[in-house]
Image (tube, rainbow, N blue to C red):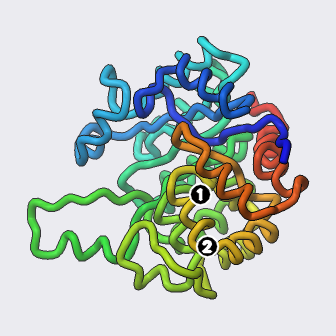
Amino acid sequence: MAHCRIIDVHNHPNWLGYNLDALVANMDQMGIEKTWLLSWDMPAAEAEITIGHFKNMDPRGLCAPLWLVVEGLQRHPDRFIGGWAPDPRDRHARAKLEAAVNLQGIRVCGELKVRMMYDNPDAIALYRHCAKLGLPVLFHLECPAYLQGRFDGNLKGWPEWYGGSMSVVETMCRLCPDTTFIGHAPGFWREISGDAASAQENYPSGPVEPGGALIDVLRAHGNLYCDLSGWSGCNALKRDPDHARRFVTEFQDRVLFGRDQFDRRLMDVLESLRLGKRVMDKALRGNAEKLLAEPAAR
């Protein structure tokens, strides 16, 4: 099937060995017209949990700070759409984000990936300001129930977690009805299945069970969208193709193609679902265009 020119809503500057020019070359190979070039901004103590954060990203800074995104926008202005999520715990987060919109042309608040509950008052204030600025909020959710056990009896343990549970996402959507949220990562996609609470791995396998919290929240809140990037999105579709076809069809106006990588595994999975050109075009481009149709408020 011939596809429209694709928009990738999730990648990072100087990530996994791909510098900005290599990323653009890879986009050309994959038929991707534009990429949302996202930051990942977090305190040093949180970034230092795992060595992977350092070997996979630019060594000149922690993770993917705003200046790296700006560097990408300046180098390839026609290929990248800039995203930056300041830490909501910074008392000046809203003012800084507004300045980034006005000065650097930032159009997405993302990727939000910090060690906090995403429905705390500071975060809610930031999301509501994003609605005023015309920015969707793309967040990384990774806090499965089994994780709590890794703290018990281990004073040295400090495993990664980000955001909280799907109940937190529901609160975000309910308290910020004018804000568009885009969910991503293992803690988001494992909740497609009703047995997520008992699953003991980040990427559960097997048929999707009824009663998934993700589906409930999507049905209740039209301001929640789905970022298919990373293995988490692929796994959620690949583990149960029949369910995946129904899921993408039902939420065809709110699923977004993203990679967070440089391969075509998500495209392979989507093509295997035989979704039809209209649905595929929405996922590959149309829904992303819709979210950024209006220029950010100045």
Which residue is under mark 2? 214
Q: 37 or 5, which is in the foreground?
A: 5
* 151 lies above or below 51: below
Residue at 55% x, 56% y is 184
Spot the residue most to the right: 278
Residue at 44% x, 42% y is 87
Give the distance between the C-alpha atoms of the residues marked 2 and 1, in whole angstroms: 10 Å
Tell me if mark 1 has few (under 14), some (14-19) or many (20+) residues whose alpha carbon lies within 10 angstroms of its own.
many
Q: Position of residue 101 (x, y in %)?
A: 65, 27
Q: Position of residue 266 (x, y in %)?
A: 62, 51
Left or right side of 206 for 278:
right
Would residue 197 be seen by someone viewing this image from the given angle? yes
Residue 145 lies in what quarter of the image?
bottom left
Q: Secondary structure at mark 1?
A: strand
Q: 88 or 278, which is in the foreground?
A: 278
Residue 255 lies in what quarter of the image?
bottom right
Label 2 with label 1: CB-CB less than 8 Å: yes
Q: Secondary structure at mark 2?
A: helix
Q: Amino acid at mark 1?
A: Gly
Q: Position of residue 261 (x, y in %)?
A: 52, 41
Residue 159 lies in what quarter of the image?
bottom left
Tell me if mark 2 has few (under 14), some (14-19) or many (20+) residues whose alpha carbon lies within 10 angstroms of its own.
many
Label whose residue precedes the other's in the sequence (2 or 1): 1
Residue at 59% x, 50% y is 265
Q: Which mark is residue 183?
A: 1
Left or right side of 77 for 86:
left
Q: Amino acid at mark 2?
A: Leu
Q: 104 or 124, which is in the foreground?
A: 104
